[in-house]
Amino acid sequence: MVYRNGSNTDVIIGVFDNITVKNGMTIVSLDAGDSLDLRFLDINIYGANSIEQGINIVLLNPVQKNITVNETIACRYLTHSATQQSIAHDEGYVRVMFDKKDYDTHNSYDSGTGIWTCPEKGFYKVSSWIEFLTSDNGGSKRAGIWKNNTFVSSGPNFSSGPKLQTEDVIQCNVGDTIEIKVVQSDLGRDAKLTGNPNETVLTIYKI
């Protein structure tokens, strides 16, 4: 008998009741990773000195399947030099708008809404650097990452110094969204982000 994948029930060819078989053949569909094994059960040999055993497999109408290495998925956005986004005082987290594209392999970030949409399931490293104007130094400031409008993680809380950073590795499915938000308080007034494109940056890439 010939069995598939070592199973005692998945019989491809069965020979029973003293039937002599030579060049037994069948056609079977196999998936990648399937195995075949030949077994002799309760053998009675009449007038024979030996047994020839073996399996000869011939591939009929083979189909070529292409294995594609995952392509790079990455984006990097900055703030435009003319943009100085205002972050309201004591009004909770505000979405940061990175409105100048450096590169975006799948056009997955919408600079008009400030939302990145996942194009392929996987793990993504999300990093952001956010700088406030030096004149708006002081108070309490924090940057965080949101997935599907739900808080995921945040960087340290700064009571002094204008620059914030947040970074995390996030598992995403197709269609999931990521956004960066900041909050500032205790300054006593609204604060503005710098328009320096080298200081306020978002990068997202699949690892």
Image (cartoon, helix red, strand yellow):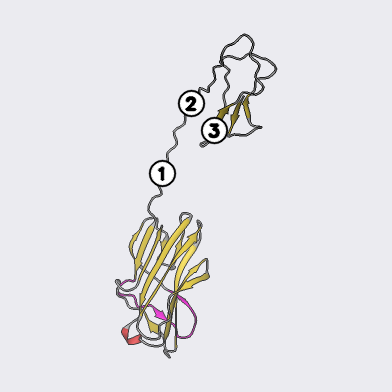
Q: Which mark is residue 35?
A: 3
Tell which circle, 3 or 1, labels the residue nearer the N-terminal end.
Answer: 3
Labels 1 & 2 near each other (Cβ < 8 A): no
> Which residue is at the front of the view, 156 or 18?
18
Q: Which mark is residue 94?
A: none
> Residue type at mark 1?
Thr
- 81 over 29 or under it: above or below: below
Q: Tell me the residue that label 2 is attached to.
A: 61
Mark in front: 3 vs 1 = 3
- 85 over 41 or under it: above or below: below
Query: Would residue 126 be found to the left or right of residue 173 on screen?
Result: left
Tell which circle, 2 or 3, labels the residue nearer the N-terminal end.
Answer: 3
Q: Secondary structure at mark 2?
A: loop
Give the residue at the far right of this rendering: 17
Report the magenta residues as a range: 79-95
Mark 1 to mark 2 CA distance (whole Å): 22 Å
> Which residue is at the front of the view, 179 or 142?
142
Mark 3 to mark 1 CA distance (whole Å): 25 Å
Mark 2 to mark 3 CA distance (whole Å): 19 Å
> Which residue is at the front of the view, 138 or 53?
53
Q: Which mark is residue 68?
A: 1
- 185 over 2 or under it: above or below: below
Query: Would residue 24 be found to the left or right of residue 69 on screen?
Result: right
Residue lying at 47% horizontally and 56% vertically, measured from the top left: 122
Mark in front: 2 vs 3 = 3
Q: Secondary structure at mark 1?
A: loop
- Based on the displayed image, in which of its 4 quarters is residue 133 positioned? bottom left
